[in-house]
Image (cartoon, grey):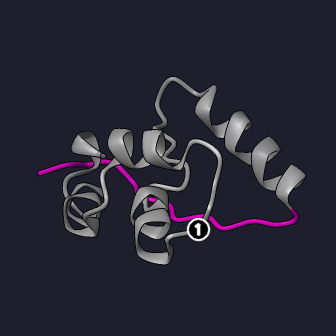
């Protein structure tokens, strides 16, 4: 059983969310996951986005393994 703590943080505007993410990811005891469902989103919406195919190839387009990783043990975060 994991003893870690999970935080889900949403922030805006964009520049503040990036600063917040960067500050957390610099902690050695913290794992940051940025836009984990973006591959699914691009695949589902079929948006014409630069790098779309590469993003989907890297991230995948199935939301289920992403959610399983994010809701599983803290040490095994996606």
Q: How many callouts does the rendering have?
A: 1
As drawn, 74 above or below 67: above
In the rendered image, the residue lying farthest to the front is 48
Q: Which residue is mark 1?
A: 47
As drawn, 26 above or below 11: above
Q: Residue at x 46, y 44 (%)?
A: 55
State the SS at label 1. loop
Q: Residue at x 25, y 64 (%)?
A: 62
Counting from the top left corner in percent of width and height, residue 72 is at 20, 58
Q: Does residue 14 appear left or right of residue 1 in this picture?
A: right
Give the class, few, some or many, for how many residues have Cα within 10 Å of label 1's Cα (few <14, many ≥20): few
Q: Classify residue 61 by image quadrant.
A: bottom left
Q: Classify residue 36 by image quadrant.
A: bottom left
For the stretch drawn in magenta, what is the main secondary structure? loop
In the rendered image, the residue lying farthest to the left is 1
Counting from the top left corner in percent of width and height, residue 10 is at 66, 68
As drawn, 52 above or below 10: above
Q: Residue at x 47, y 69 (%)?
A: 41
The question of residue 5 being in magenta is answered with yes
Counting from the top left corner in percent of width and height, residue 75 is at 25, 40
Counting from the top left corner in percent of width and height, residue 54 is at 45, 39
Q: Does residue 48 appear left or right of residue 37 in this picture?
A: right
The part of the chain drawn in magenta is 1-13
The question of residue 30 being in magenta is answered with no
Work out whether residue 11 or residue 66 is closer to the camera in this orientation and state it.
66
Q: Does residue 18 appear left or right of residue 6 in this picture?
A: right
Q: Residue at x 62, y 61 (%)?
A: 48
Work out whether residue 33 or residue 45 is closer to the camera in this orientation and state it.
45
């Amino acid at each position: 059983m994991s003893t870690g703590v999970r935080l889900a943080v949403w922030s805006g505007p964009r520049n503040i969310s990036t600063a917040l993410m960067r500050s957390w990811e610099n902690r050695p005891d913290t794992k940051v996951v940025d836009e984990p469902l973006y591959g699914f989103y691009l695949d589902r919406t079929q948006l014409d986005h630069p790098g779309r195919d590469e993003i989907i190839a890297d991230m995948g387009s199935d939301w289920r393994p992403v959610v399983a990783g994010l809701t599983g043990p803290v040490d095994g975060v996606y």
